Amino acid sequence: MKRLPILLFVLLLAVSCGRRTAEEHPVRIIFDTDLGNDIDDVLALEMLLNYEREGRAELLGVTLCKANPHTAEFADGYLRAAGRGDMPLGFAHRGVTPEDGSYLLPTLGASFDGQPLLSPERTADELPEGYVLLRQLLAQQPDASVVLVAVGPLTNIGNLLASEADEISPLAGRELVAAKVKRVVTMAGLFGDEFDFPEWNVMCDVEAAQRTFHLCPVMLTTTGWEVGNRLLYPHESILNDFGDPEASPLAVAYCHYMEMPYDRQTWDLTAVLEAVEPGVWFDRSPRGRIRIADDGRSTLDVAAEGVQDYLIIPQERTAAALEALVARTAGKTPEQ
Ligand SMILES: [Ca+2]
């Protein structure tokens, strides 16, 4: 008779595990990016498109936090080339970093075999404000179903959290996020003892970063500068894994970002990896509340009831994590 409760327990466990798997895949993601600044945004977007092709993620929309019009054209053209010209796009019309950067225009102007690599059909003028699109997308989603991945200055996310009830939703931004977002993963800040300076995404819009970390009502995990700094994307992959590099928008953009050959830090890629494969590759700090000082420096105040933490990459796992990042960017992901 003792066996029956054990059998029941095993059965219940199997059922609950099965349900959890069904809910978690694909991971439903909204991606907020400053495409056009650093090159890692392009690689991170490519990872998301590959995850989507494999059924491991569903990309609900992309919001752009770099206020340069070519960012919008690049994003639309890139998504269109990947068969996702239907992607909802938002744009921070009054955002930061309005400069062209080094790879948007050369990639938009590039062609192969007489065909342009990118053929955008939408311009920034046509796109809704980033936080407005975030409100629209979130209002349509089931409760606690969205993973929000933000890998640029936190302009759109800060505006979302500060937004008021409107015709899109009776919920203010903070309530809307509390209702619909399961988890936020950002690339922002710098933690640990090895370095001490304000991280770039935070510095570009300190107020938005302060607002985001102060107001975010759901679990927020950030990958600090020091994590992506330990994992350098090998330039050989850019030259070998994407077909003819001159025919690949990713490779063309990479080759225009800086003078080749160079191995770039994988900051934004680590956010995507953690968002789609939570807990697999990184450890996490104790929980607490992340504070952004007025000079942009970030610290974690550890607190038992805290809902924020940062990623840690153990030394012994760096090689495997980098291999995973490259495989997922190049679309060679083995099933976990
Ligand atoms: Ca970025």
Image (tube, rainbow, N blue to C red):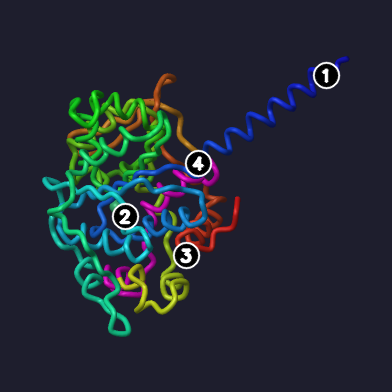
* Span of residues in magenta: 253-281
Which residue ends up furthest to the top in the rendered image? 1
314 shown above or below 145: below
Residue assigned mark 4: 278
Amino acid at dot 3: Ala
Q: How far apart are marks 3 and 4 (CA)?
A: 20 Å
For mark 3, does the 10 Å Cα neighbourhood hold few (<14), some (14 to 19), or many (20 or more) residues?
some
Between marks 2 and 4 in the image, the one whose residue lies nearer the viewer: 2
Residue 4 has which mark?
1
Are the residues at dot 3 and dot 4 in contact (C-beta closer than 8 Å)? no
Depth check: give the residue in front, 124 or 253: 124
Answer with mark 2 or mark 4, whichever residue precedes in sequence: 2
Which image quadrant: the N terminus?
top right
Residue assigned mark 2: 86
Secondary element under disc 1, as helix, strand or loop, is helix
Residue assigned mark 3: 330
- The residue drawn where x is 38% and y is 45% is 194
Are the residues at dot 1 and dot 2 in contact (C-beta closer than 8 Å)? no
Between marks 1 and 3 in the image, the one whose residue lies nearer the viewer: 1
Q: How far apart are marks 3 and 2 (CA)?
A: 23 Å
284 shown above or below 263: above
Please state if 236 lies on the left or on the right of 299 as rendered. right
Secondary element under disc 3, as helix, strand or loop, is loop
Answer with mark 1 or mark 4, whichever residue precedes in sequence: 1
Answer with mark 3 or mark 2, whichever residue precedes in sequence: 2
Residue 121 has which mark?
none
Q: Position of residue 78 (x, y in %)?
A: 31, 63
